[in-house]
Image (tube, rainbow, N blue to C red):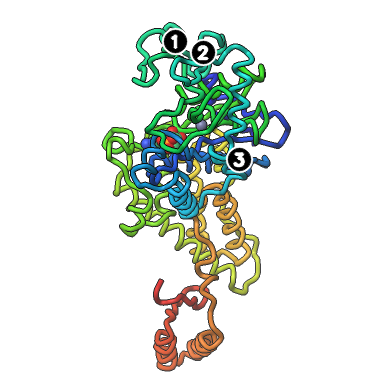
């Protein structure tokens, strides 16, 4: 499977290659844990999940690292407002984040390093930047990265460097930096920080946001690694700055492939905390939507295309998934029946599925391949697909779902039929064979009284719990 991805660095779709054959080191910028993540954030984490599962589907062994930003202006402000220590403030949001990932069936990363656990690594990086003459200390005690002293700056964002001399916004508390494009590596302590501070050789303060990702990605993946991802708003300045910090110190290329997803929008605008136009996953679950429905919607558009969030899309996801469920149930029932294998099979769409993903994660085409399996399997079931053919179709759906992660298998199997229910069903089958309709109806009612529905099809009867 030859994967081709759009690399934000080269700005083209290109063959995906890795440093070590068959292995991918992958870093994804994680959440700032000052509040609940919204589903816009989860569009980014789900794109990364699809990417990672696609890499695994293609046979790569993936080591994924996702950071937790647990110290910045927002977390500090939140903890001070709540009157609790920083860690006590962020802990429940970290727990909530992991719960949400689970509800969305996101495969866990290998490591979730938190910024506050990596202050020594960040200090070492700053020291190395001082040693190379690239970091400087400002009047107020903050430490900045000098963009002018690092000629490699601007490669990811393809910046015209003159843009850095004009038109860049300067925060009020960054008045004393040398160049407008310079960014903070270390923020000097001030009273708004309360007791959140570390004593570094150059003074008391805390690390800048960009620094944590350079320090932690290199710690867990090495000085050069394969793949770095995030939402498109991370591209500049965050990722540009990550490259600068890392490459200025190591002199080696930091990351081979950069991938960014487009935003989730609401009425044409980016879903964001500041605009107030957001939904958390919790809100949606409380309204009766499920994690798999949200997953289905957020993964359904190609990741570089903007996606507009609507409740109609969630409703359509519910209908679409019900079709998949019904097909899986019917295939599962057929696969469990006795019957000779006459060799009949529904046509396979796995190659089309793999091609779609290999083509820069074309999710709409991958969904189409899944529904082609459903359509053809239903048709084949109607034409008397043998149990082995049903099993083959199930295996194909399972293979696809290793990437998609929203198909439910074993709903029918999970509802294991108790022995007394099975005995009633067997008796009913006998009664029907003997054309004893009165007895057959009596047994149907007896089954219903036990909470089971019996359905008669071409291949005999199937049992389903009534509640479903
Ligand atoms: P933040 O916690 O703001 O740093 O965002 C975490 C991740 O979510 C980053 O990768 C962002 O780029 C991404 N993100 C934020 N808002 C959206 C959105 N509306 N659509 C897609 N990704 C987003
Ligand atoms: Zn980052």
Q: Which of marks 2 and 3 precedes in the sequence?
A: 3
Tag 2–tag 1 contact (CB < 8 Å): yes
**Which labelled disc corresponds to residue 179?**
1
Q: Which of marks 1 and 2 precedes in the sequence?
A: 2
Residue position for label 3: 64
Q: As drawn, which residue projects farthest toward the top?
A: 162
The quadrant of the image that shows the C terminus is bottom left
Regarding residue 280, the answer to whether it shows in the image is yes
Q: Is residue 95 above or below residue 268?
A: below
- Ligand number 1: quarter of image: top left
Residue position for label 2: 146
Tag 3–tag 2 contact (CB < 8 Å): no
- Please state which of residues 439 and 224 is positioned toward the viewer in this rendering: 224
Callout 1: few (<14), some (14-19), or many (20+) C-alpha neighbours within 10 Å?
some
**Which labelled disc corresponds to residue 252?**
none
Q: How many marks?
A: 3
Q: Is residue 26 above or below residue 251?
A: below
Tag 3–tag 1 contact (CB < 8 Å): no
- Please state which of residues 468 and 199 is positioned toward the viewer in this rendering: 199
Residue 82: give x, y in percent of width and height.
Answer: 35, 47
Q: Nearer the viewer, mark 3 or mark 2?
A: 2
Q: Secondary structure at mark 3?
A: strand
Relative placement, left or right, of 109 versus 330 is: right
Residue 306: give x, y in percent of width and height.
Answer: 37, 33
> Disc 2 versus disc 1: distance between alpha carbons?
7 Å
């Amino acid at each position: 499977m030859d994967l081709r991805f759009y690399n934000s660095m080269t700005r083209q779709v290109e063959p995906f290659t890795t440093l070590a054959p068959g292995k991918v080191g992958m870093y994804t910028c994680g959440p700032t844990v000052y509040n609940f993540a919204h589903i816009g954030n989860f569009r980014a984490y789900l794109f990364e999940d699809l990417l990672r599962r696609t890499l695994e589907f293609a046979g790569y062994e993936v080591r994924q690292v996702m950071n937790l930003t647990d110290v910045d202006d927002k977390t500090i402000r939140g903890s001070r407002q709540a009157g609790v220590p920083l860690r006590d403030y962020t802990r429940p949001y970290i727990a909530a984040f992991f719960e949400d990932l689970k509800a969305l069936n996101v495969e866990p990363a290998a490591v979730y390093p938190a910024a506050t656990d990596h202050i020594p690594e960040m200090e070492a990086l700053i020291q190395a930047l001082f040693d190379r003459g690239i970091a400087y200390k400002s009047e107020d005690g903050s430490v900045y990265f000098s963009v002018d002293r690092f000629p490699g700056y601007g490669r990811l964002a393809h910046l015209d460097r003159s843009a850095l001399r004009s038109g860049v916004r300067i925060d009020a508390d960054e008045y004393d930096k040398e160049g407008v494009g310079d960014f903070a590596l270390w923020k000097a302590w001030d009273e708004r920080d309360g007791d959140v501070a570390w004593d570094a050789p150059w003074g008391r303060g805390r690390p800048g946001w960009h620094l944590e990702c350079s320090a932690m990605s290199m710690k867990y993946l090495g000085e050069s690694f394969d793949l770095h991802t995030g939402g498109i708003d991370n591209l500049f300045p965050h990722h540009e700055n990550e490259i600068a910090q890392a490459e200025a110190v190591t002199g080696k290329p930091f990351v081979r492939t950069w991938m960014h997803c487009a935003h989730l929008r609401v009425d044409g605008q980016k879903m964001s905390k500041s605009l107030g136009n957001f939904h958390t996953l919790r809100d949606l679950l409380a309204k009766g939507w499920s994690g798999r429905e949200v997953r289905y919607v957020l993964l359904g558009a190609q990741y570089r295309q903007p996606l507009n969030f609507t409740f109609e899309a969630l409703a359509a996801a519910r209908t679409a998934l019900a079709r998949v469920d019904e097909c899986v149930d019917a295939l599962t029932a057929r696969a469990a029946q006795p019957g000779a294998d006459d060799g009949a099979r529904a046509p396979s769409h796995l190659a089309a599925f793999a091609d779609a993903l290999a083509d820069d994660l074309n999710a709409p085409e991958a969904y189409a391949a899944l529904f082609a399996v459903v359509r053809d399997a239903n048709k084949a079931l109607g034409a008397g697909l043998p149990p082995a053919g049903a099993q083959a179709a199930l295996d194909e759906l399972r293979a696809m779902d290793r990437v998609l992660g929203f198909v439910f298998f074993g709903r029918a199997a999970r509802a294991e039929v108790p022995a007394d229910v099975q005995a009633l069903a067997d008796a009913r089958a006998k009664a029907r064979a003997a054309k004893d309709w009165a007895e057959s109806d009596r047994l149907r009612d007896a089954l219903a009284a036990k909470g089971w529905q019996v359905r008669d099809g071409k291949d005999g009867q199937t049992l389903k719990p009534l509640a479903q």
